[in-house]
Image (cartoon, grey):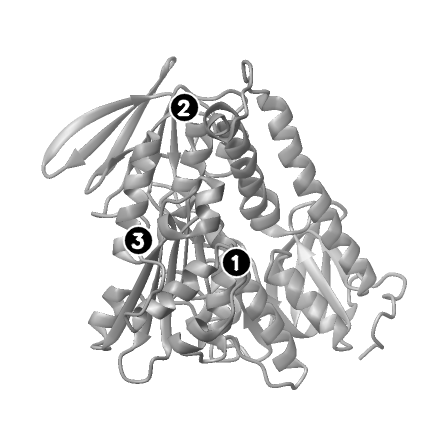
């Protein structure tokens, strides 16, 4: 192995060049795996088919969507939220082009930052489309032809891609995925969102704040499936209060595109109706992306959903080939992929490594935000786990009141016998930041009493976590 931070030799990506580790995909899983492996002294190459690094998350996912969420929230506050603070404005105008340009600048800075990290850690960046040709060789088709790279170990980190519906095929203009929904050049008058998961709710919130009439269609009987049902119901009420409309237990069957928009056929309880809109955003989930990878051809096993099967150390059925991130089972979350990237690199280097899947937070970045880690009440019931539940509303939190953001609550689930925290769910302002305390507590096996006895600064939003922890033993102080 080459020494840490030693630059790749000239021609490091020529045909026949060998590496200790070759990573396919430069998203949050792949680029982190590459950097960590380089830190551990490996000679590393990372192949990425797109011209910029960072994968879906940095380019057309987590980062641009959060940039628009923040900008649209500022716009909404300027129009509707500042008067109560004694701030009076004149006419507030939307400059969508500037908002989109700012989003693009944020993306550019961060993707260039990944490129800088590759240079700093001497990771060879290879642009092209990778195809496995054996357990230790990859053919990379790029602008200058195809080259073969060889490595002692290969990590597949090719991520995921939006799922299309048979009756609503993407056309990039009228029926779009989340990628196109980040770049509308004008605010649609009527936006129909198919899918009430995080992506649909977040992008629906963005365009609703900017002036669109938004209707969300969901096949199931609830929004944010997989998260705590009670918290999801509370979030739905708050979003409806903001003006979003929901049609649950409803299926989008097909769509007819015309000059003036789209008409979608909806079915609910045996009844068919038609919904007219300007744009349809299909956000029903994502599928593992392994198109053209050649994984099956070299013997890499996959499950019925097209996910690569791996063992506890991310090893596939082919010795020397590993897989992480969205292309394997588990929640499709950037931070989950990154932790797996660290773990697989450390395992290949001979170190002990693991990811604690019971302490991976999941967040919906609407406003208020919904953040969750660990077990839900429904899961506790399904697993016959006896729990005590403590809740505390932000209505009784001093800082939330000062912010005029007092909607929502904190819910903590603790084992009824041991008091160990099994799950924490937060619906409220800055829930995405506050959840970190709960993740840390669960990582260290904390009890609800541990959280309750920790001193929390006053006045702060995390005091709501302390009070919910006290409420587990029915001794909350401020309600």
Q: Is residue 290 visible?
A: no
In what element is the residue under mark 3?
helix
Q: Are marks 1 and 3 in contact (CB under 8 Å)?
A: no
Q: Are marks 2 and 3 in contact (CB under 8 Å)?
A: no
> Please, is residue 356 above or below residue 236 in the view?
below
Q: Quadrant of the C terminus?
A: bottom left
Question: Which mark lies nearer to you, 2 or 1?
Answer: 1
**Disc on the earlier residue, 2 or 1:** 2
| Residue at image location 56% in from the left, 48% down from the top | 56
Left or right: where does residue 298 sit relative to residue 363? right
**Disc on the earlier residue, 1 or 3:** 3
Q: Which residue is mark 1?
A: 458
Along the line of sight, the residue nearer the viewer: 326 or 408: 408
| Residue at image location 27% in from the left, 42% down from the top | 218
Q: Which residue is mark 3?
A: 231
User: Disc 2 and disc 3: Cα gap in Å?
Assistant: 25 Å
Along the line of sight, the residue nearer the viewer: 375 or 21: 375
In what element is the residue under mark 1?
loop
Local packing at callout 3 (Cα closer than 10 Å; few below 14, some 14-19, many 20+) is many
Local packing at callout 1 (Cα closer than 10 Å; few below 14, some 14-19, many 20+) is few
Along the line of sight, the residue nearer the viewer: 355 or 402: 402
| Residue at image location 68% in from the left, 58% down from the top | 47
Q: Quadrant of the N terminus?
A: bottom right
Q: Which residue is mark 2?
A: 212
């Amino acid at each position: 192995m080459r020494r840490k931070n030693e630059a790749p030799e000239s021609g490091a990506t020529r045909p026949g060049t060998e590496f200790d580790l070759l990573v396919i995909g430069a998203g949050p899983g792949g680029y982190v795996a590459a950097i960590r492996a380089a830190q551990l002294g490996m000679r590393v190459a990372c192949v990425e088919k797109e011209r910029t690094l960072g994968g879906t998350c940095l380019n057309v996912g987590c980062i641009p969507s959060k940039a628009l969420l923040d900008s649209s929230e500022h716009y909404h506050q300027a129009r509707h939220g500042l008067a109560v603070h004694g701030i009076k404005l004149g006419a507030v105008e939307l400059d969508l082009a500037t908002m989109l340009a700012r989003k693009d600048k944020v993306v550019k800075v961060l993707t260039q930052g990944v490129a800088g990290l590759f240079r700093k850690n001497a990771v060879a960046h290879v642009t092209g489309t990778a195809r496995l040709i054996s357990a230790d060789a990859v053919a990379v088709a790029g602008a200058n032809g195809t080259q073969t790279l060889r490595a002692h170990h290969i990590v597949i980190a090719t991520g995921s891609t939006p799922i299309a519906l048979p009756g609503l095929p993407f056309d990039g203009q009228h029926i779009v995925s989340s990628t196109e929904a980040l770049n509308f050049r004008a605010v649609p008058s009527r936006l129909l969102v198919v899918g009430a998961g995080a992506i649909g709710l977040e992008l629906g919130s963005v365009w609703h704040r900017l002036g669109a009439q938004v209707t969300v269609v969901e096949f199931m009987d609830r929004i944010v499936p997989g998260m705590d049902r009670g918290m999801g119901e509370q979030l739905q009420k708050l979003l409806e209060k903001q003006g979003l409309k929901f049609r649950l237990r409803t299926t989008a069957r097909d769509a007819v595109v015309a000059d003036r928009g789209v008409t979608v056929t909806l079915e609910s309880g045996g009844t068919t109706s038609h919904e007219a809109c300007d744009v349809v955003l299909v956000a029903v989930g994502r599928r593992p992306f392994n198109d053209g990878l050649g994984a099956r051809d070299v013997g890499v096993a996959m499950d019925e959903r097209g996910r690569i099967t791996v063992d506890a150390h991310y090893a596939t059925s082919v010795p020397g080939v590993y897989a992480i991130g969205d292309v394997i089972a588990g929640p499709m979350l950037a931070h989950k992929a990154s932790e797996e990237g660290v773990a697989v690199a450390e395992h290949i280097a001979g170190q002990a490594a693991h990811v604690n899947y019971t302490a991976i937070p999941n967040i919906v970045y609407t406003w208020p935000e919904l953040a969750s880690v660990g077990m839900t009440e429904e899961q506790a019931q399904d697993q016959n786990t006896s729990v005590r539940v403590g809740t505390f509303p932000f209505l009784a939190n001093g800082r939330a009141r000062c912010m005029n953001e007092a909607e929502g609550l904190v819910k903590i689930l603790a084992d009824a016998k041991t008091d160990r925290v099994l799950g924490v769910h937060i619906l409220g302002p800055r829930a995405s930041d506050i959840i970190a305390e709960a993740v840390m507590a669960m990582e260290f096996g904390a009890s609800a009493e541990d959280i309750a006895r920790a001193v929390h600064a006053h006045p702060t939003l995390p005091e709501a976590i302390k009070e919910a922890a006290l409420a587990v033993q029915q001794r909350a102080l401020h309600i």
